[in-house]
């Protein structure tokens, strides 16, 4: 048995207390506990503590410190169970303590993978340009089940997906204005697929793109790309051969034959 001789507040953390014990050989530092543990077990000067009680207090305090870590981790944003487990293990919390903390967090409604998934989807819809397939992948990587991910995607309806995809498509078309319309469409389609949009959404987004006005932008793109090709080839060839190389290059870039022939006639010497 040991007698509790003194309780002092830690200088660097006012919520933690040092417990001093006397095992019959004079006072020595015993262990420290959080304020909650101190109050819960009504620790006070003069108490008699056996070894089992001391070990139980130390373990209870260890779990409490780990639980405090978990609460702090949750203070920034919601977490999935997988994220929480990984975090606590990285902090070198004992695996059996991790299970206990996870159970407590669920009981206190501080962990809920379905609500976590719902919240993440609502946030991503507001702040990112990702499509639903990419968001589902992100959720599953965070430990959410496929069924929970599917349920959460109700917060990302088709019309919202189409709105985002169409907005991105128009922006991408403007950025690629010096490419052929065929290349622009292919680039938009590929990028939307990479962003996780479905084929149905992509096709509707492409169909909603504004038509070109009298081919003006396509012609400007032909001239821009054609002049680059002329500069590339004119040092090594000329005449008919130069025209054929430029013609083949513009065709590979997706321009229609009528505009290619017009460019060759107006910009490339015979």
Image (cartoon, rainbow, N blue to C red):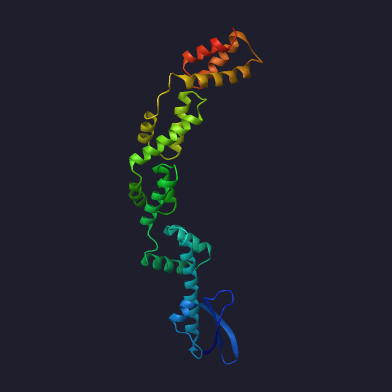
Image x and y of residue 183, in percent: 48, 26
Left or right? Give the position of 161 relative to 32: left
Residue drawn at (37%, 30%) of the image: 208
Residue drawn at (50%, 80%) of the image: 55
Image x and y of residue 146, in percent: 36, 50
Residue drawn at (49%, 66%) of the image: 69
Query: Taking the image as drawn, is residue 56 in sight?
Result: no
Residue 77 higher or lower than 178, as above or below: below
Q: Quadrant of residue 12?
A: bottom right
> How many numbered callouts?
0
Nearer-the-camera pick, 156 or 142 = 156
Left or right? Give the position of 157 relative to 177: left
Nearer-the-camera pick, 62 or 73 = 73
Q: Residue furthest top?
A: 270
Left or right? Give the position of 204 relative to 173: left
Image x and y of residue 62, in percent: 50, 73
Nearer-the-camera pick, 155 or 80 = 155
Nearer-the-camera pick, 224 or 34 = 224
Residue drawn at (52%, 20%) of the image: 220
Residue 209 higher or lower than 134, as above or below: above
Residue 135 higher or lower than 217, as above or below: below
> Which image quarter holds the C terminus?
top right
Image x and y of residue 127, in percent: 44, 46
Q: Residue furthest bottom?
A: 24
Query: Taking the image as drawn, is residue 13 in sight?
Result: yes
């Amino acid at each position: 048995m040991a007698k509790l001789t003194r309780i002092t507040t830690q200088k660097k953390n006012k919520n933690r207390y040092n417990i001093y014990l006397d095992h019959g050989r004079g006072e020595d530092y015993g262990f420290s506990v959080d304020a909650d543990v101190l109050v819960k077990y009504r620790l006070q000067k003069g108490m008699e503590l056996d070894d089992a009680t001391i070990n139980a207090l130390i373990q209870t305090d260890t779990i409490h410190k780990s639980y405090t870590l978990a609460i702090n981790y949750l203070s920034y944003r919601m977490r999935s169970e997988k994220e929480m487990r990984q975090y606590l293990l990285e902090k070198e919390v004992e695996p059996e303590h991790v299970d206990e903390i996870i159970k407590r967090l669920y009981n206190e409604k501080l962990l809920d993978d379905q609500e976590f998934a719902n919240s993440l989807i609502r946030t991503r819809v507001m702040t990112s340009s990702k499509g639903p397939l990419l968001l589902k992948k992100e959720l599953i990587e965070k430990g959410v089940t496929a069924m929970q991910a599917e349920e959460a995607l109700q917060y990302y309806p088709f019309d919202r997906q189409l709105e985002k995809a169409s907005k991105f498509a128009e922006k991408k078309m403007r950025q690629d204005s010096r490419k052929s319309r065929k290349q622009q469409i292919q680039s938009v389609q590929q990028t939307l697929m990479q962003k996780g949009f479905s084929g149905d959404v992509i096709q509707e987004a492409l169909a909603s793109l504004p038509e070109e006005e009298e081919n003006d932008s396509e012609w400007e793109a032909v001239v821009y790309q054609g002049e680059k090709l002329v500069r590339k080839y004119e040092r090594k060839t000329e005449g008919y051969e130069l025209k054929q190389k430029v013609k083949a290059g513009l065709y590979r870039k997706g321009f229609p034959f009528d505009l290619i022939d017009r460019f060759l006639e107006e910009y490339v010497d015979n």
